[in-house]
Image: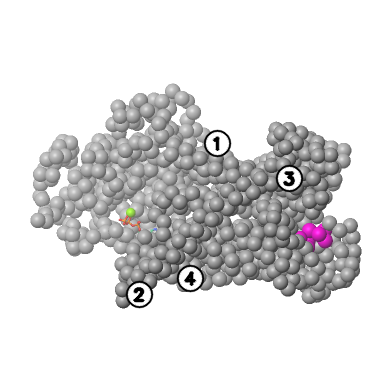
Amino acid sequence: MRLKFIEEKIAKGFMIIASLAVFAFVVNIIYTIFRRGIPALNWAMISQIPAGGYYNGGGGGILNAIVGSLYIVLCSTILGLLISIPVVFYLNVYLKKDSRLAYIARLAFDVLFGIPSIVYGAFAFTIMIYLGMHTSLGGGILVITLLIIPIFIRSMDEVAQQLPKDLLDSTYALGATKLETIKVVLRQIAPGIATATLLSVGRAIGDAAGVMFTAGFTDSIPTSLNQPAATLPLSVFFQLSSPNADVQDRAYSAALILIFIVLVISILGRLITNYFSKHKI
Amino acid sequence: MSSNSSYRILKNKIAGGLMFSITVFSVLLVVLIGLGLYLKSVPIFEHNSFWHLIKSSEWRPGNNQFGFLPFIAGTLWITLIAVILALPIALLSALFLTEFSKSYLKKWVFTALDILAGIPSVVYGVWGTLFIVPWISEKLAPHFVEYSTGYTVLAGGIVLGVMILPLLISLFVEIFSAVPREFRDASLSLGATKWQTSKHVILRKTFPGILAAVALALSRAFGETIAVLMVCGNLPLLPHSLFDSCYPLPALIANNYGEMLSVPLYESALMLAAFLLFIVVFIFNASSRAVIYRIERKFK
Amino acid sequence: MKSYPYQNPSRATWAEDYSFLNNDINNDEGLAFNKSYLKVKDLNLYIHKAHILKNVNLEIPDKKVTCIIGPSGCGKSTLLKTFNRLIDDTEGIKYEGSILVDDTDIFDKKTEITDIRKKMGLLSQRPCPLPMSIYDNIAFGCKMHGERNRKKLNQIVEEQLKAVGLWEEVKNRLHAPASKLSIGQQQRLCLARGLAVEPEFILADEATSALDPISSKHIEELFVKLKQDYTIILVTHTLRQALRIADHVIFMYLGEVIEAGSADEIFNNPKQELTRKYLEGAFS
Ligand SMILES: Nc1ncnc2c1ncn2[C@@H]1O[C@H](COP(=O)(O)OP(=O)(O)OP(=O)(O)O)[C@@H](O)[C@H]1O
Ligand SMILES: [Mg+2]
């Protein structure tokens, strides 16, 4: 009879252990990267591009990768927003709730959301070969845009589906066309957009498999879209593959820089999201 | 006035058309990717049957021998391990967060989850090589096998498991919190404990949702490339135990994209690998949706 | 035309279409106040500093129907949920005072919360069948308390389904999902589910408000029948319902118990000005 109380205690114990495990992983990952990353970290790493023989222990830094990653993230986020906002708007305002197209489109975005970045990369790569393009900043931006569009659409759509119907009706009642409700809709889904952007940026900056094929890797900072571009994750990866222990240490520092950028973005993003949600109502 | 209003209507129509095309194009993208990868992988079928490719474990691109079995097995192994490891942790902590814990605790765990979700996969890879791989080779493996480098199926599974944890937990929390309060009240007021309520009512009620979440996490795990590549050892051999190296499909593609243009049929083989991944993800999404739909109808 | 139920001195007129009440009214020989198993003493309840229940003192008569009435937001549901401590899960809850059931304080640290809840069957506003079969819904509580014997469970299920008059309707599909039943049937199922764990009290929170008139009449009939064995406490917004079935009435306003007494007293001769106004429909 009192068995159920014992069961309750045991279950609760396991739950607490499971939740603590999540903490333990976070702490362990960050601690591990910090411990190995701090020693090799210096100002040159983030202010210089690789000097000659960098991958054999020569001087220089990974500014090329930092800048390359930022370029790609910035451009593809903007592109992604420009493409996904109209789609979300179309799905939720132009189409009826039970529309066949809306259903298929949502299914398609679910599938696209699940497609691994390596598949996007491979696909984009074949297209680029077909077009006779070389690995380039433009290619990287393109593939990352493809990668984050489903993230954008899915998370914005989730918020947009909650849009009160009265809101649209009342704007129509004022004589607005569907297109003209966009301002109202945008204001309503602003928090959704902020969250989606946050997610996408995180995914975009951390992605290695997609850009591997398309953006290539280079030691210089790209000055145009058709030059190859280095990215931080790949920089970590390549440095780590070096047999030279000093270079491996720099890979850890590069990983640290990457984590740092991601954390800063997510904290900033959170502040912005909070700001938006506070001002919504 | 009337010209103005007809202008507005025209603008509305044009914008509608434009948005329609973007939407349709993105839908077509799925088809396009599938088709593109398929067309690119067709040449390899001229020399090998599909079943032969899937069943063979001979991988000698120079000799035109492309057996995918080791790669498929590798992918399945690490995905399976990842889910087996992550699922109980995710379910338990999601239940803890929604049913048992106080809100200040929730805040802490959610922060940890946010960080975990934000960590780029290459960093997981670095962590794997710095922590998991040595742990396996020095601490764990000696109990079971004579020697292991640590770059193993198990390492891949563990790293992948930690990577899908935040996704699983946040999905589960969302699903559990969607269960109306009344269900808990009904069960609790019969004298059931919280755990009994979680086990018999919450988990049962949300079963389709749990399946969906797992399917989503699975398809994320299937395609994870860089982190897994860094800890799996990448030997194109069929793994026989958790302490063998393996070579998952995504790693195969990533490792060889550079040289694939120089060996005949190699490109085609790699595109087939990509096509397989695509198909698996596609089938997972579609079938889990069908299952969920059916279960939901049964329960509702 | 507006007529207020309480102005009708004779309840018999209301019993026209509720003939089941007749015998009850006739042998209603006052309330047995000497015998009360549920006592509330100086109960104060706060949610995040908001004072929700203020100094509540009550005695609920045994084996009677007690109706709690009062305007929306006055704390009726909260009081009900305090009786079986379902309120415990609310964020920021704090309470003082005591509730005595059989002379044990339910707030006492030593009191086992699941035992209290077992004693108090809860019927919520919207029927809430658990996501399982009809059979399992009823057997659920017993199983949770450790009953495994299949025969015994079968017996309990049949017994309780009969008690709420659902047996004939569902005996051929006991293993169909409970959610397939009509709303009215679901509510009766929920009642049977509560009865299956052998409670002493039935707490009902606007249990008929989501039902059609026939079903709610059905439930009312059940309450009247069940009060032979159970103490029934129900929250209602329909004064007519209270009038039809209440033996004892509690009127609450802004978290306070304004007046409590026998139904006849409260409806026909309220002592408090507030009660009178509420009954006249001055506010709701
Ligand atoms: N979780 C909560 N947090 C904060 N305040 C609450 C909470 N639950 C209830 N309250 C407050 O407690 C008061 C009483 O609520 P309760 O639900 O008991 O009223 P009620 O009498 O049942 O109303 P109704 O007739 O509308 O059901 C209300 O003012 C309500 O706002
Ligand atoms: Mg209420």
Q: CA distance from mark 3 to mark 1?
A: 61 Å
Residue receiving disc 4: A278
Alpha-carbon neighbours of circle 4 within 10 Å: few (<14), some, or many (≥20)? few
Please name which of the two marks, 3 or 1, marks the residue nearer to the observer. Answer: 3
Q: CA distance from mark 4 to mark 1?
A: 47 Å
- Identity, as a three-letter code, of the amino acid under mark 3: Ser
For residue C205, side relative to residue A76 (left or right): left
Residue A22 in view in this figure: no
Q: Is residue B177 left or right of residue A228?
A: left
Q: Nearer the viewer, mark 4 or mark 1?
A: 4
x 73%, y 33%: residue? B52
User: Circle 4 sits in a helix, a strand or a loop, which is it?
Assistant: helix
Q: Which residue is mark 1?
A: A3
- Mark 2: give few (<14), some (14-19) or many (20+) Cα within 10 Å: few
State the mark number for residue B268. Answer: 3
Q: SS of the residue at dot 1?
A: helix
Badge 1 density bin: few <14, some 14–19, many ≥20, Cα 10 Å: few
What residue is shown with label 2?
A: B4
Which of the marked residues, 4 or 1, is nearer the chain's N terminus? 1
